[in-house]
Image (tube, rainbow, N blue to C red):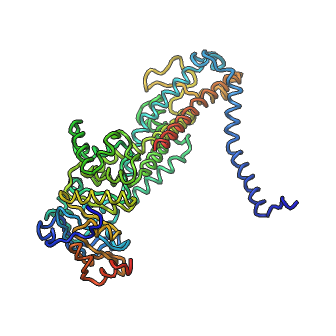
Amino acid sequence: MKEGRVVVNNAVSPAQKNGVKLRTERVNLYYGSFQALRDVSLDIPPRAITAIIGPSGCGKSSLLRLFNRMNDLIPGARVEGNVELDGIPIYSSKIDVVELRKRVGMVFQKPNPFPISVFENVAFGPRRHGIANRAQLEEIVERSLREAALWDEVKDKLDQSGLALSGGQQQRLCIARVLAVEPEVILMDEPCSALDPLATLKIEDLMRNLAAEYTIVIVTHNMQQAARVSDMAAFMMMEQDRAGVLVEHGPTSQLFTNPKDKRTEDYITGRFG
Amino acid sequence: MKGTIISSRQISQRVAFVFLGLAALFATLPVLLIIVYTIINGAGTISWNFLTQFPSQAGKAGGILPAIVGTFYLMIGTLAFALPIGILAGIYLAEYAKDNWLTRLINMAIMNLAGVPSIVFGLFGLGVFVLAFRFGFSLLAASLTLACQALAMVITTSREAILAVPREYREGSLAIGATKWQTVRHIVLPQAFPGIITGAVLAISRAAGETAPILVTGAAFLLPGLPSSPFDQFMALPYHLYTVAVHVPGAPKTIMWGVALVLLAVVLSFDILAAIIRYRSRRGI
């Protein structure tokens, strides 16, 4: 993506063109007695970048973690309403969560490469899914690292610890690790908040390239970033009881230039948050 | 005198430093004294014959080979039972057990297990392994008894080591579709391994020095040969020391110090091994 290009101006939104990859319908999320999300209905189009923005604590990450059921790990978490991947409800008891997370990968706020070699980091997923053939693993590792725009920087140090890389490289390694299991959706939870501006730009470039093939959902508190990279944007806020609600969503250009809701306008013009 | 004015705050600080330093000194002094005193008195006794021969004249002369071998077997036996069960229990408690009254009860029981007097473990072993299971006075019964005592420490250190593995690693693994067990097996356990091994080594070094539990479950003072099966009785260093010191009139002091030195060397070498493992793993991060 070229510098200075701020907003993708979609004549027809990808959602209208290609349908819906992920959908939440009237979702409520509780952690024990605390309601973290209220009545969230959101459609996420395939092969596009959807940014979820909003002030701290408004439930952005909680919403993101609905899509690969990472909230399941939190004791007392409870979901009401419907969350769908390709029209299939993922909170149904018939869903294999392991298979779901293979299809819906996740990149975290803090780069979290495993304390093992670069190669083994990327090969970790494929190995766990049953690939043992060395040549096949090598091919997957190279393909994934190339796709994550990291291959040229690490091809001579595949045996070094993943922790020896720089922060930006570590985050791209984590993206490669997700790509290696060939997901359809990549969830990114503030993937650049621990990175310097240059490393951030690299990740953003990478995201634009990946959006041709993958459905990407990114949580960010950086509105410039949302404007730069995303096709669609969703704005969330916290209500009086601290429950997160979806205020409005739509094509990024529209949300940033012509918001429908007064609260969105206040937020993006910097009047609060 | 102007240059040496010291405020009362500085005085109280210095006094505090002196007291803290003395406390630290008193904490380490007994250990050092014991080690030095044992070496001074025992070093003269240590010889190739002392380490490789059977005792003679009811322990008043000869060597202590069967006691060394017996203690060695005991440590292996203890480890063989305590390590697998302890690690598996630690994994369960850290990763799988839900936070409910049962788990809390188990955790409390384990903590209390560590505080049970060793003679009570001995009587438990006598009742359960020697009599009820009909293992008799044997290496097996004594190993199992010591294993029960070591379990508390192995479980606790395993659980702590597993819980200390950062959540980020687990999430990263789960988020690419690894199962819970794959995550534990390939991410958590390798990370926790040094901590687990450290705990196991310390537990076994403690077991090696125990007298009371083996006293009532299978240790013998004098045996004509080395144990040839787990159902044989055995000799062991701490029990040998106790008997020579208490029940053999006229036994030379040099023999006792020699046994004490060997026992101390066995226990300390394991503690040092644990320290090395800890140091290396810390440096590896």
Q: Residue A83, relative to residue B193: is it above or below? A: below
Residue lying at the far bottom of the rendered structure:
A262
Quadrant hosting residue A82: bottom left
Specify whether residue A262 is in view.
yes
| Residue A23 falls left or right of residue B282 | left
Residues A88 and B199: in front is: A88
- Measuring from the top left, give residue B25's x and y in whole percent: 71, 45
Q: How many marks?
A: 0
Task: Locate residue A97: give its quadrant.
Answer: bottom left
Observer-nearest residue: A236 or A15?
A: A15
Q: Residue drawn 29% across and 76% down?
A: A245
Q: Is residue A76 above or below residue A39?
A: above
In the rendered structure, the answer to whether residue B11 lies left or right of residue B149 reads right
Q: Position of residue A21 (x, y in %)?
A: 16, 64
Relative horizontal placement of residue B118, taking residue A189 as reference (left or right):
right
Above or below residue B43? Residue B128 is: below
The residue nearer to you, when weighing B275 against B135, is B275
Q: Residue B73, position in %: x, y?
A: 48, 27
Instruction: Classify residue B33 as left or right of residue B169.
Output: right
Can residue B123 be seen in the rendering of this structure?
no
Q: Residue at x 25, y 80 (%)?
A: A259
> Quarter of the image containing the N terminus of chain A?
bottom left
- Give the residue drawn at x 24%, y 55%: A101
Q: Quadrant of the C terminus of chain A?
A: bottom left
Farthest right residue in view: B1
x and y, in percent, of residue B274 in the image: 52, 37
Q: Is residue A17 above or below residue B37?
A: below
